[in-house]
Structure formats: C-alpha cells, structure tokens
Image (cartoon, rainbow, N blue to C red):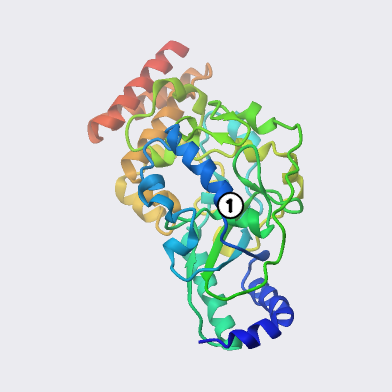
Amino acid sequence: MVNIHILKLFSQQFIPLLIQRAQELGFQQIAIANVDLSQHESHLLEWLGKNFHGDMDYMARHGTKRSRPDELEPGTIRVISVRMDYFPPESASIQKTLKNKQLGLISRYALGRDYHKLIRNRLQKLVNKIQQEIGPFGYRVFTDSAPVLEKALAENAGLGWIGKHTNLINQKAGSWFFLGEIYTDLPLPVTEQPAENHCGTCQACIDICPTQAIVAPYQLDARRCISYLTIELKGPIPVEFRKPMGNRIYGCDDCQLVCPWNRFAKVSGEKDFQVRHGLDAPALLDLFSWTETEFLKKMEGSPIRRIGYMQWLRNIAVALGNSGSGNTAYTAKVVSALTQKRPQVTALVQEHIDWALNELSNSC
C-alpha cells in the first residue's frame, strides 16, 4: 500500500500533479471532497418520501449507501470528483429545433457516444497514473452509475453548486458537463470549500419548464420531468404531459438552455461527444421509419439505445401527434406513417399512436 506519511508530506506537490494528469485525460476540472453528505442525505430522504422519484426504484433500493460513501465502498475517506464538458460543437440550435415541429429534439448529452464507458475508462487511467506516482491504494470509479450522489459530492468538492433546477452549475463553465468520481482511502487534502450558491433571485429554469416539474426551488418532481418521461418511464406517458412535451423525444434541456450561467459554457473537444447520425435536428418521420434493426445499428454506442426500440417509437409518436401545423400535406404523411406502423408495434406504442392520430385530426 501507499506510504501515507510520504503522501501527507508531499500532498502539496501531489495535488498539482493530480490536476495535470486529469487534464491530460480530457477532464476540465478535478477536486477532492470529504464524505460528509449528511445535509444532502436529508434532502434525498425528503425527496423519496414525496415519491418524486416515480418509478426509479433504484433511487431508494440501497438505503443510505447512496449518501454514505464509506458504506458503499468500505474504507472510503475521500472522493476525487471530476467534470468533463459535453456540449457538442457545431450542433443545430436547440431553439430552432424546438420551433420546427417536423424535427425531434434530443438532449445534447446524448448526441454522441455513451459517456459512461468513456469517463469510467478515463478515470481508471487516472487511477493508474496516480498509482505509478505513489503506489497502490484502495479505490472505486463511478460515473452516473451505482448509488452515488455525484452532484452533492461535486458541490462539496467545490466544482459548482446545485441550482434551482437540481443540476450542478459551475460559475465559469455553466452546467453542460458530465461528472465522475473516484472513491478512495487516500487521506488527500480537501481542495475546496463547497461552492457558493449564485442562483440568487433568478427562477428562469422554473418558469421555462414545459411540465412544471420544478415544483419549488431545488425541488424536482421527476414524475413530471420530460427527461424522466422519455427515458426512465417504461409505461404510458401520462396524457397531461404529452402536449407539453412538444417535439422533445429524448430528454429535455430547457432548464439549462435558459440558465444565465451557461453563457460561460464551453463546447466539448471530445470526438466521441460530437453529433452522430444528424441527431441534433432529425426529421421525426425519418426516425419513425427506422426498423428495429436500424435503430439498434444506428444507436450502437449511444445512451439512447438503452431505452429500446418500442419506447423510442412511443416518444416519437407523441412528437408526431404534436406536429400538426396547418400543413395538410405534411399531416397526411404523418397520419400515413402512424397508421402503417401501428400493426407492427406493442399495445403501449399503439396507445400513443392512437393519441397522436386523434390530436392530428383535431388540428386539421
């Protein structure tokens, strides 16, 4: 194991080296936090008590392991928290895509390859580099995986503050970034105090939310959130939320789009986060015409693939139902596509197709 005495003696030299190694691997920022998440644990338990997690049973499945890192990984006394920008360069305007009802809007984080594997691999490489410097130590790497309160840990490390929309905001980099963690038994110096909250009186994210999912500052009812409805929810989308969804078919970026701190956001230099298959402004009818084989092929390596073909069609059917705009020729094409697809899909998708057909008939 690493000589802890030596580590303490050279901690001041070690931290700049750690930052340098992380930046070499494509991380924009790295910081170190302690494992005290008691305040965040209270917030989590209150959130679960209100059933705001909906069908995400995994949020409650592991008890306090999510908010107590040393219970999840015994021996953990520090968490190395990192962030990596993901906003893809040269992607189509979100605002213009939202206004064009013939196009589908996919959350910017999902336009390229799945970040889970990429960031986990980079974190492992970072661990390897650290071990080359100081010897072996206990660790475990995470990125949006396992029961980890990554935004809370990042806030404690000083990477940003959790905003009113419950996303992490960095004063110099906005919120378009992924997070990752290394749980470790190294007694590293904590690098920062928790970041100061700079949301102030702004509530742009609350006002813009299409489904009023941000029920109060710092309180998100996931059951109303379009990201939850299009990704996590496996059953029928509640009718009350179908029209507010508009043409959002995988996730929703509205609350980040209006956040004034995102004027400081940077585009990503990661090739794997660049737009694939024109998904930054895809034609809904083109997407809906894909066979399951085409879906699986085109979405290979994409986070979208995990929702499955039928859930993908369910989401697009809702968007097509919202595409009526007085263009009778286009509407006729949509009706034809929905009608032809209906016998080929599950009862779940058929329900949403029927809803869409009804909406289109009413819009004519």
Q: Nearer the viewer, residue 137 or 210?
A: 137
Q: Is residue 27 left or right of residue 59?
A: right
Q: Residue at x 54, y 55 (%)?
A: 150
The answer to whether one can see residue 253 in this image is yes
Q: Position of residue 289 (x, y in %)?
A: 37, 39
Rendered position, 249 above or below 70: above
Rendered position, 66 above or below 321: below
Q: Position of residue 293 (x, y in %)?
A: 30, 51
Amino acid type at circle 1 is: Ala
Label 1: few (<14), some or many (≥20) within 10 Å?
Answer: many
Q: Nearer the viewer, residue 192 or 124?
A: 192
Hey, which quadrant is residue 261 in on the image?
top right
Q: Nearer the viewer, residue 137 or 74?
A: 74
Q: Residue at x 46, y 34 (%)?
A: 52
The answer to whether one can see residue 274 in this image is no
Q: Residue at x 67, y 82 (%)?
A: 8
Q: Position of residue 57 (x, y in %)?
A: 36, 43
Q: Position of residue 28 (x, y in %)?
A: 68, 64
Q: Quickly name the residue at label 1.
A: 152
Rendered position, 101 above or below 2: above
